[in-house]
Amino acid sequence: MPNNNDVNNLILEPQGVYLPGLKFPSAFVSGAGSGNIDMYTCPTGKRAIVTYIIAYNTAGTSTTIFPNLNVSGTYYRIGGAAAVAAGGNGQVLNLSAPTSSLIILEAGEKIGVNTTQAGCNLFANIMEFDNTAPLKTSKVVSMGNGNNTIYTCPAGKKAVILDQWVALNLSLKKLYYFNNSGSSNSIVWYAVPNGGSTGATNQLQTETVSNATLSVRQGGGWMLNAGDFLVCNTPIGTATQTGWVNVWEL
Amino acid sequence: MGNNVINSVGFISGFGPLIRGAKFINGFSGNTSGTVDIYTVPAGRKAFISWVYGISSPIMSGTLNIKVSGTYYNLLGANAAFGNVARLFVGQVINAGESFSFITGANPGGNLWVRIMEMDISTPLYTGRNLSLTSGANTLMTVSSGKTAMVIDSSGGCYINSSGGQYRNLSGSARSVQVYHVPNGGSPGSGNQFSGNAAVANNAAVTVSVPRSMNSGDSIVVNTDASTATQWAYTTYYEI
């Protein structure tokens, strides 16, 4: 509920997730070098929604950028690539195919890009808030062969999966998987009731995902009860596969 | 403020700040003709203008304008058609005493509806603007001390990918425009350039990309190549 300090808080759409301690910190990097570039680190006690990264290329050579999540010093690619012409802009994490991707960072995690050429000015949309808010990304950054539990609704809670626009629209996409394994994979998503196991009766989505490609699947408008869980099944054990969902728990 | 949530707060689409003293105003102009000040912001208030809807037959055309101290600033450049429930997004906060206006072109007589959220001036939602750009660097907004800011997008939220600023060129000839995100204490240059040389034709009103999340003291600067007075630019942002 709003309180006397409401000017420092935020409402999320008519659904109304309250985000305490909100800030919009800059993630600006001037004249970035090539390779993996960290743009922003989520501080202790905070989470941060990252919805948009844009580059302006000051160099005379075109470059290609894609978004990276840095967890404990390891970079995980989480989105499609954008070409950035000399003297032009390119966008990733921009909520539109094929580069759409939405993720919420936990404390210590970093967002950034990989760029093939040096000379980009990098900017991002960051919404940083206290980690007491009931909004988070549940992620498995290094998936194994077979079933990977991406999210389990905690005891005493119910959860809804947010769509690609951080809202609850039934027709928008909600299930994220990035395939950086080197080969095409056929994945299967399940929403498994508490105490159950994956099977045809709780299967959500299937998709064959090319290498270096983001899969964002619709997955319906379902809610999860305590103990219900989401599974992404992948046929290979190559570690460079990342799956995640953005959840609101109440 | 307090527990009287319904009467004291509101929000705009997508992410949005709590809007203090929110009221939804129907800015209606029936049988529109000539120059019409559809809505004027009362003292002690400001207002977020989101969409304008129009219907007419034959199709009425005209321009949307912000009226500041008696001067009309054209939002569109050229006349736009308002027929068969046409709609245009505005995305600006206007201040006490300022008006949202329509100047009719062809086929007067249409009906217009303006979606307005009126609020207390303490609400941290602002439009930074420069109504008379000069040659060189023009600062649209600077984040207040101790605050951070997020530019809202063309749907009124702050997470959808689209640009959050507008530049209007009514100078009589084409202009070249650049945008910079200048960190606190810095100055505009290639190291903080955000968008390249946008060639803007005369009478055009273009959307330019602007930076998003910003720290205290950061600024958005627009550079234009001439001082002709009829150029203006704005960006709308939350500050927390």
Image: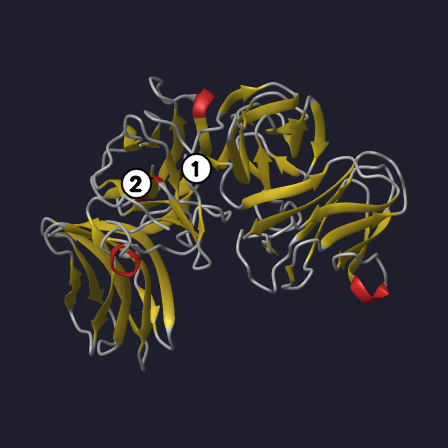
Q: CA distance from mark 2 to mark 1?
A: 24 Å
Q: Are marks 2 and 1 in contact (CB under 8 Å)?
A: no
Query: Which of the numbered marks, if any, corresponds to residue A189?
Result: none
Q: Position of residue A91 (x, y in %)?
A: 57, 39
Q: Nearer the viewer, residue A217 or B73?
A: A217
Q: Nearer the viewer, residue B63 or A10?
A: A10
- Element at label 1: loop
Q: Position of residue A117 (x, y in %)?
A: 65, 23
Left or right: A4, with A224 as reference point: left
Left or right: A15, with B224 as reference point: right
- Which amino acid, mark 1? Arg
Figure label count: 2
Quarter placement of the C terminus of chain B: top left
- Element at label 2: loop
- The residue under the point 29% across, 61% down is B6
Q: Nearer the viewer, residue A193 or A38?
A: A193
Residue A54's quadrant in the figure? top right
Q: Residue furthest bottom?
A: B57
Q: Is residue A59 above or below residue B195?
A: above
Q: Is residue A247 above or below residue B181?
A: below
Q: Nearer the viewer, residue A86 or A79?
A: A79
Q: Is residue A30 visible?
A: yes
Q: Residues within 10 Å of mark 2 (few under 14, many from 20)?
A: few
- The residue under the point 35% across, 54% down is B11
Residue that label 2 marks = A5
- The residue under the point 83% across, 56% down is A197
Residue that label 1 marks = B212
Q: Is residue A80 visible?
A: no
